[in-house]
Amino acid sequence: MPVLNNIHYLDSESGKELVLIYGFLGSNALWKYQIKEFQKYFRVIVIDHPEYDKNNKAKPLNGIKKFSKAVEKLLHILKINNFYLMGHSMGGILGRSQRPRFKSAGSFAIY
């Protein structure tokens, strides 16, 4: 799993970008079955929350705004300008509440 800006993420590396963000206390394993199917059609990027899963030694980003800013920075570094975003639980809240921050995002599917 690559690391950029102290954030671990999974990247299937081909296709139109689909960013998956899991919920509070989750892990990228939550998306295991979706990743397998979605990567047939999309470049799937799953970002680990600071302090969770592979980022368990990362400095905490207290609050949704700080985490969304970290996601935005990672996507900028990866040169991803137009993408779909799918969030589960807190990941959905992040997507919905921070949609203005992700100005270049395409469509949103939020759960």
Image: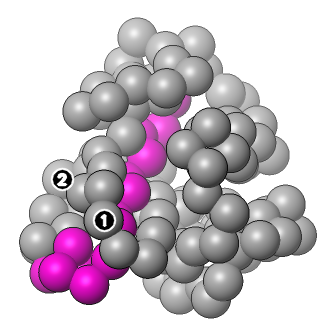
Q: Residue furthest right?
A: 100
Tell me the element at label 1. loop
Residue 51 picture location, percent across and down: 45, 24
Real-space CA distance between mark 1 and mark 2, rounded to the nearest whole angstrom: 20 Å
Q: How many marks?
A: 2
User: For residue 41: magenta?
Assistant: yes
Q: Residue at x 62, y 37 (%)?
A: 77
Q: Mark 1 is on which residue type?
A: Ser
Residue at position x 48%, y 83% in the image? 111
- Residue 107 position within the rendered picture, expressed as x and y whole percent measured from the top left: 62, 88
- The amino acid pointed to by label 2 is Ala
Which residue lies at the image location 65% right of the left edge and 72% below the top edge? 82
Image color mode? one colour
Residue 62: image location, x then y, percent: 71, 30
The answer to if 21 sits in the magenta stretch is: no
Q: To which residue does mark 1 refer? A: 14
**Which residue is nearer to you in this view: 25 or 40?**
40
The kind of secondary structure element at disc 2 is: helix
Q: Which residue is mark 2?
A: 29
Circles 1 and 2, Cβ within 8 Å, touching? The answer is no
Residue at x 14% of width, y 63% of height: 32
Q: Quadrant of residue 74?
A: top right
Residue 63, quarter of picture: top right
Q: Nearer the viewer, mark 1 or mark 2?
A: 1
Tell which of 27 and 75 is nearer to you: 75
Picture layout, residue 100 above or below residue 60 = below
Q: Residues within 10 Å of mark 1 (few under 14, many from 20)?
A: few
Q: Which residues are magenta?
A: 37-50
Q: Quadrant of residue 110?
A: bottom right
Along the line of sight, which residue is nearer the eye, 76 or 95?
A: 76
